[in-house]
């Protein structure tokens, strides 16, 4: 069981903290309210205006909303920025205006000034910069939600990336977690039977770990060992003796951002091949290793043109599935591929789904709906807005009668990965045959003699 850390449980630590927290909540609420009202207003107009006029208005509205979100993310940082980063990767379900504007949050967040970043590196390493590095680029190559990355050369000539944590980010993220706990708790009380705590506990465990770069170093090493036999996957080597809680030094990877289609084309890389590789690499991590990189947004995925090979970056958010859970997930995918709704319902029960009436067979209907949707989604590596809408309507109706009251916490990060991958595949314009891709990772091993 996941036990939330003390900071996640503390709601407010002092009056100044309270003022800050209320201020953040108010700003999130204002942004959300403006977006909600904008959409409602346009839905009303939609009934009265010509479709061509409306098209233009919707585009304008999406652009404005994307700007509101982008501005709020930069002002508030913390989990708000992480949330907007997640949206930025969802080219499969969101209008392009959002993807375009918010994708800057993946690796182009305004950085911490160089002097402060350098000061932090020297303090963490306990030595002046020039004792450690032959060269250190004061201008970061990228900056994202928790850190920025400087290119540097070690005294022994190795080219490295120095990941420096943004000062103050830890307090911000912990405060956001406490606010989320308050929000989830309130929804749980209003909704009565809905159990959100397992989901929140999962987030409360993963997020603070992300702030400790020594944990990130361990995750990276573990995946590097697991992928050692697969040449098409590149995971940077960690320089342990120069890595601390807030500074991580690792091999520099030179490549092309996965969503940079012109860049891929110029390097002669087939985006379809990249999408296929991406799907395989994550199927292998989740279904075979039971340990996976849980944050594959485009800023964390890089393509090395020779091969092509896929570089994974940023291992802060990683997840280990309990062995029985991984097996039940495999059974679920197998039932999906076989079109077996009985087995799927059984797998859902074993995974820990629960409906309000508590009867295991009440998940049968959900399983049948999922299967019917899977047939329609076949040959698409990503969701699309129409399909998502259908799924929401159909599964939503079934659930209204007998809602799911418990979703297993272990699925939070699996779901996050699936959402992100669906978005990235869409950006790559790919058509991966998911059934064929998943089969090798779920097929029962042939009997050994
Ligand atoms: N080893 C590396 N080689 C080259 N570039 C790197 C490397 N590691 C990170 N980067 C660049 O720096 C950016 C930020 O690094 P990283 O993703 O680790 O930071 P983060 O703040 O944890 O990100 P996120 O917001 O995704 O949590 C990456 O998006 C990538 O562009
Ligand atoms: Mg990142």
Image (spheres, helix red, strand yellow):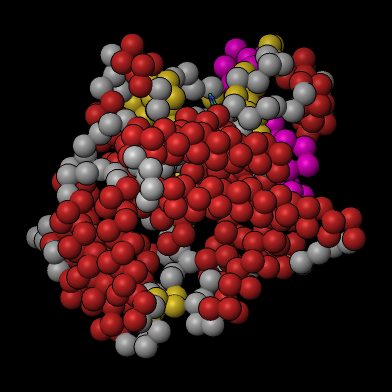
Percent coordinates x, y for residue 51 in the rendering? 33, 39
Kindly identify the residue that appears in the image at 45 percent across and 63 percent down: 410
Residue 387 in view of the camera? yes
In the rendered image, the quadrant that contains the C terminus is: bottom left
Percent coordinates x, y for residue 109 in the rendering? 63, 30
Any magenta on residue 161? yes
Residue 238 in view of the camera? no
Kindly identify the residue that appears in the image at 70 percent across and 61 percent down: 179
Find the magenta span and give its range: 152-173
Kindly identify the residue that appears in the image at 30 percent across and 46 percent down: 384
Q: Residue furthest front?
A: 48
Q: Residue furthest left?
A: 449
Percent coordinates x, y for residue 8 in the rendering? 70, 63
Any magenta on residue 283? no
Kindly identify the residue that appears in the image at 68 percent across and 16 percent down: 139
Residues 2 and 401: in front is 401
Query: Eyeballing the image, is 298 above or below 251?
Result: below
Answer left or right for 156 relative to 413. Answer: right
Query: Eyeballing the image, is 369 above or below 271?
Result: below
Query: Eyeballing the image, is 156 above or below 226?
Result: above
In the rendered image, the quadrant that contains the N terminus is: bottom right
Percent coordinates x, y for residue 64 in the rendering? 55, 36
Q: Quadrant of residue 348?
A: bottom left
Q: Quadrant of residue 443?
A: bottom left
């Amino acid at each position: 069981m996941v036990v939330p850390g003390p900071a996640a449980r503390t709601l407010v630590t002092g009056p100044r903290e309270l003022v800050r927290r209320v201020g953040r909540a108010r700003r999130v609420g204002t942004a959300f309210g403006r977006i909600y009202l904008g959409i409602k207003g346009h839905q009303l107009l939609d009934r009265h205006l010509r479709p061509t006029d409306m098209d233009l208005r919707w585009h304008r509205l999406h652009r404005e909303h994307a700007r509101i979100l982008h501005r709020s993310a930069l002002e508030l940082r913390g989990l708000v920025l992480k949330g907007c980063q997640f949206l930025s990767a969802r080219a499969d379900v969101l209008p392009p205006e959002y993807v375009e504007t918010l994708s800057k949050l993946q690796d182009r967040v305004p950085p911490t000034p160089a002097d402060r970043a350098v000061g932090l590196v020297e303090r963490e390493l306990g030595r002046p910069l020039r004792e450690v590095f032959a060269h250190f680029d004061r201008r970061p190559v990228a900056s994202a939600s928790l850190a920025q990355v400087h290119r540097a050369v070690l005294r022994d000539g190795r080219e490295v990336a120095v990941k420096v944590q943004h000062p103050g980010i830890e307090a911000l993220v912990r405060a956001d977690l406490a606010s989320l706990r308050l929000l989830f708790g309130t929804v749980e009380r209003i909704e009565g039977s809905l159990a959100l705590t397992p989901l929140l506990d999962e987030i409360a465990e993963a997020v603070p770990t992300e702030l400790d770069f020594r944990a990130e170093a361990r995750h990276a090493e573990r995946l590097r060992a697991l992928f050692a036999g697969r040449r098409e996957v590149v995971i940077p080597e960690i320089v342990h003796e120069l890595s601390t809680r807030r500074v991580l030094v690792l091999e520099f990877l030179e490549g092309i951002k996965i969503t940079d289609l012109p860049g891929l084309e110029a390097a002669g890389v087939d985006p379809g091949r990249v999408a296929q590789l991406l799907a395989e690499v994550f199927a292998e991590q989740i279904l075979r290793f039971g340990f996976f990189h849980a944050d594959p947004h485009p800023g964390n995925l890089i393509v090395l043109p020779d091969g092509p090979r896929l570089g994974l970056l940023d291992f802060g958010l990683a997840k280990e599935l309990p062995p029985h859970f991984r097996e039940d997930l495999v059974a679920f995918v197998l039932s999906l591929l076989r079109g077996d709704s009985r087995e799927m319902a059984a797998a859902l029960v074993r995974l820990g789904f629960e409906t309000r009436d508590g009867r295991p067979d009440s998940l049968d209907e959900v399983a049948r709906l999922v299967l019917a949707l899977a047939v329609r989604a076949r040959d698409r590596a990503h969701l699309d807005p129409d399909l998502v809408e259908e799924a929401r309507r159909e599964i939503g109706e079934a659930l209204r009668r007998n809602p799911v009251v418990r979703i297993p916490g272990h699925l939070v990060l699996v779901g996050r990965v699936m959402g992100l991958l669906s978005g990235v595949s869409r950006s790559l314009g790919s058509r991966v045959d998911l059934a064929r891709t998943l089969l090798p990772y779920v097929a029962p091993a042939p009997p050994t003699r």
